[in-house]
Amino acid sequence: MNAALNTGFADRLKTAAEAKKALLAKLQPRPTVTDPNFTPRSARQAAELDRVREERAVARAAARQAALEAQEAARKAQLDLEAADLDAKRGQRKERKALTKAEAKAKRDARYAARKAR
């Protein structure tokens, strides 16, 4: 068969090398058309991670604010309780003073009445 084509050893080697190159070229990855709107997976994951971090930061800030508000409400309630207690003590002190004043007046009146009776 090859004898009719008059091919020599060098020609056969050359043909085999070309066939091998063609086979390797066929197995090589071909350039593909990429979608212009394609975002790599790492970019999507980074965006998701940023979003989750932002949500958690907002949640932490809201929790911190709620804790501060609760603390402020407790402090205000404590101050109101102390003020009410102070008002009650003042009222009791006024009552004691009024009673003492009334007792002193009663003693004075008794002395005056005793002087008049003599």
Image: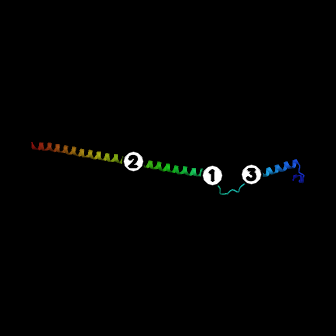
Q: Nearer the viewer, residue 77 or 109?
A: 77
Q: Residues within 10 Å of mark 1 (few under 14, many from 20)?
A: few
- Residue holding disc 3: 27
Q: What residue sits 26% from the left and 45% below the top?
A: 92
| Whole-percent x, y for residue 48 in the image | 58, 52
Check disc 1 and give the amino acid type. Arg
Hey, which quadrant is residue 116 in on the image? Answer: top left
Q: What residue sits 12% from the left and 42% below the top?
A: 114
Gap between marks 1 and 2 measured at Cα = 49 Å
Mark 1 or 2: the one toward you:
1
| Whole-percent x, y for residue 112 in the image | 14, 44
| Whole-percent x, y for residue 44 in the image | 61, 52
- Residue holding disc 2: 74
Q: In the displayed structure, does residue 99 sit left or right of residue 3?
A: left
Gap between marks 2 and 3 measured at Cα = 75 Å
Check disc 3 and give the amino acid type. Leu
Q: In the displayed structure, does residue 51 sit left or right of residue 72?
A: right
Number of marks in picture: 3
- 92 shown above or below 39: above
- Residue holding disc 1: 41
Callout 3: SS: helix
User: Is the Cβ of the residue at disc 1 closer than 8 Å to that at disc 2?
Assistant: no
Gap between marks 3 and 1 measured at Cα = 26 Å
Q: What residue sits 39% from the left and 47% below the top?
A: 74
Q: In the displayed structure, does residue 5 sit left or right of residue 26?
A: right
